[in-house]
Amino acid sequence: MKIYIDGKYYEKNEAKISVFDHGFLYGDGVFEGIRAYSGRIFKLKEHIERLYKSAKAIMLDIKMPPEEMEKKVLEAYKVNKREDAYIRLVISRGAGDLGVNPFLCKIPSLVIIVDEIQLYSKEFYENGISVITSSLRRISPESFDVRIKSLNYLNNSLAKIEAANAGCMEAIMLNQNGFVAECTGDNIFIFSGGVLMTPGTTENVLEGITRNFVLEIAQRYGINSIEKQLTQYDLYTADECFLTGTGAELVPVTKIDGRLIGNGNPGKETKKLIEIFHKEIRKR
Ligand code: PMP
């Protein structure tokens, strides 16, 4: 594995950045998780666009135009000679001193890792996963907008710990108003009465690339879909539920807080959508 750091490639055990980097000290930075399928990077433009928006929101000057960043990601992907891959693109604030002041960090660090990822084993994609609702609320825009895909994941990690302690793979996070936001690393969808539903982007959710792609294919395949506020009641009484993310792709949810979703098996519409998703990503 060749890891790109600030203009050079390093072997995995040689790939290191400064302990004074504010990405390490304070979680100050932004990132993207990107997939490549069959020799092509999926939705690269969309990922780069989100990265630059995240960077802009935190006043991090990437010092490189987006077109050049795209080229760097493509180059790192090529260098690593993988057909299917999971690419982690990280831009941290860079090395500064031990104080929080981001403006003392003069040069951001750019890291590109081309690897693989398997968040859930095959059996979970076939049988579905159990999730809980976390007691922790998703960070609200009063703190920062979680559309910023930042390196600051403690809110998510703590909810994930809660899920693990309850023997679950994921946790649903509500927003500050008690409406469903998303999971710790995935967006959430339900099917209810034949309609596909997901919380809107103003509900404290990351605007997932996979989420948007699912809405795009729903439209193309004539599946009725809507972005709307959802409560726990909506989830418990849904016919079907599934999560989306670059790492997870589409994974069915069959139990939430002890309640079986539908008949407790992955739903028919969900399975159909998963099939379409896999067909579409390989087609591009
Ligand atoms: N929400 C959160 C909190 C995430 O970290 C992610 C990415 N892992 C997602 C949603 C899904 O986003 P995407 O489809 O762009 O990977």
Image (cartoon, helix red, strand yellow):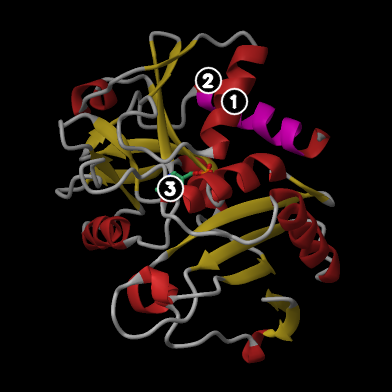
Q: Which residue is mark 2?
A: 269
Instruction: Tell me: is circle 3 under 8 Å from ligand 1.
Output: no
**Residue type (three-letter) at the residue carrying disc 1:** Leu
Circle 2: element type:
helix
Q: Quadrant of the C terminus?
A: top right
Magenta-colored span = 270-281
Q: Quadrant of the N terminus?
A: bottom right
The answer to which of marks 3 and 2 sits earlier in the sequence is 3
Q: Looking at the image, do the residues carrying marks 2 and 1 touch, with CB atoms under 8 Å apart?
A: yes
Q: Residue 1, can we see it? A: no
Rendered residue at 55%/44% (across/down): 50
Q: Which residue is mark 1?
A: 273
Residue 242, position in %: x, y? 44, 33
The circle drawn on residue 57 is 3
Instruction: Tell me: is circle 2 under 8 Å from ligand 1.
Output: no
Q: Residue 264, can we see it? A: yes
Rendered residue at 54%/59% (across/down): 61
**Residue type (three-letter) at the residue carrying disc 2:** Glu
The residue nearer to you, when weighing 138 against 72, is 72
